[in-house]
Image (spheres, rainbow, N blue to C red):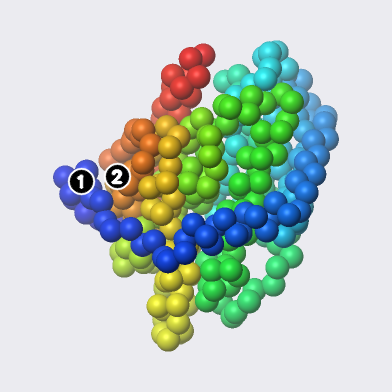
Amino acid sequence: MFTDLPLDELRRYRPPLPEPPGFDAFWQRTLDEARAHDLVPRFTETDTGLSQLHTDDVEFSGFGGHRIRGWFLRPRSAPGPLPCVVQYLGYGGGRLLPHDWLLWPSAGYATLVMDSRGQSGPDRPGETPDPVAAAHPGVPGKMTQGLLDPGTHYYRRLYTDAVRAVEAARGHPAVDAERIVVAGHSQGGALALAMTGLVPGLAGALIDVPFLTHIRRALDVTDQGPYGELARYFAGQRGHIDTALHTLDHFDGLNFAVRASAPALFGTALRDDVVPPSTGFAAYHHYAGEAQLEVWRFNSHEGGGGAQRTAEIRFLRELFGT
């Protein structure tokens, strides 16, 4: 059984920040470059047989002006403009199909589901290519793509896409631009956490077992899941470790947590060997906005599953007063 720090230590675990010099300037420059490309959001209504919902196939311009796909769903019966949950996806999968995203429309909210560029799987199909070639050799997966330079790393592109997804949602006439919530599990939780530091004026955040948080510790305590890609890379590229860690610091959730202001609900699981619980507690303890944390004692990377979703529904009802 995987073990991290004891629970009494986790409850007060607040490690130093891994903030690299020029962090804010790096992200301001990145987003300025992205916004030089027109967003050009396209919402194309699609007949999916979900008669109680409006369902749109979505495109908008992300990093480099690359077209990013997604879904936009909203209940037909709810008067607008509506709160909107911008949903980000876990590692290795794409946007799936519209009927996989019924939770938030069923609760009365709109939802924009952002496809993850270059990610797909047999049970989680995606539709968005990543046209940027890897800048340096790496192991299979996304973690080592462009790892030797923050400007070329894969997650610079994905985080930028996530910012632009919020902008696309805010511009839709059925959405209340002041009531945008970001949400995700694992990699999706990493994106949601990053948005709290990159996007001003969010109404809330649902951050479940967030990946890419307190990355340096995660590498010391687990080689499961995507962190294992880094361990395999470092086993051969011994001379690149410090350079790579400096790159990863630009994408570490702790550095976004301290810049957050939106109310947030976190989730972490004490037997999670993919995203160690100490990394989730670290993000929670550094989070600058109002925050709540659900802790699942006997769960692994699935976290609280349906019970976490129940807590999220309750959180949004309290947040929006509906």
Instruction: Left or right? Give the position of 20 relative to 140.
Output: left
- Image vertical order of residue 151 relative to residue 191, above or below: below
Q: Is residue 54 visible?
A: yes
In which quarter of the view is residue 138 placed?
A: bottom right
Q: Amino acid at mark 1?
A: Arg
Q: Is residue 308 visible?
A: no
Name the residue that disc number 2 marks.
Answer: 285
| Disc sitting over residue 12 in the figure | 1
Q: Secondary structure at mark 1?
A: loop
Residue occupying the far left of the picture:
8
**Camera-nearest residue between 123 and 140:** 140
Q: Secondary structure at mark 2?
A: helix
For the image, the number of numbered tags is 2
Residue 186 lies, in percent from the top left, at: 47, 49
Residue 11 lies, in percent from the top left, at: 22, 43
Crowd tier of the residue under label 1, counting other residues whose Cα lies within 10 Å: few below 14, some 14–19, many 20 or above: few
- Residue contact at pointers 1 and 2, CB within 8 angstroms: yes
Q: Amino acid at mark 2?
A: His
Question: What's the residue at 39%, 61% (across, down)?
Answer: 19
Of callouts 1 and 2, the N-terminal one:
1
Question: What's the residue at 48%, 69% (across, down)?
Answer: 247
Residue 184 lies, in percent from the top left, at: 52, 42
Residue 34 lies, in percent from the top left, at: 68, 55
**Camera-nearest residue between 312 and 242:** 242
Instruction: Left or right? Give the position of 112 relative to 55.
Output: left
Question: What's the residue at 20%, 46% (across, down)?
Answer: 12
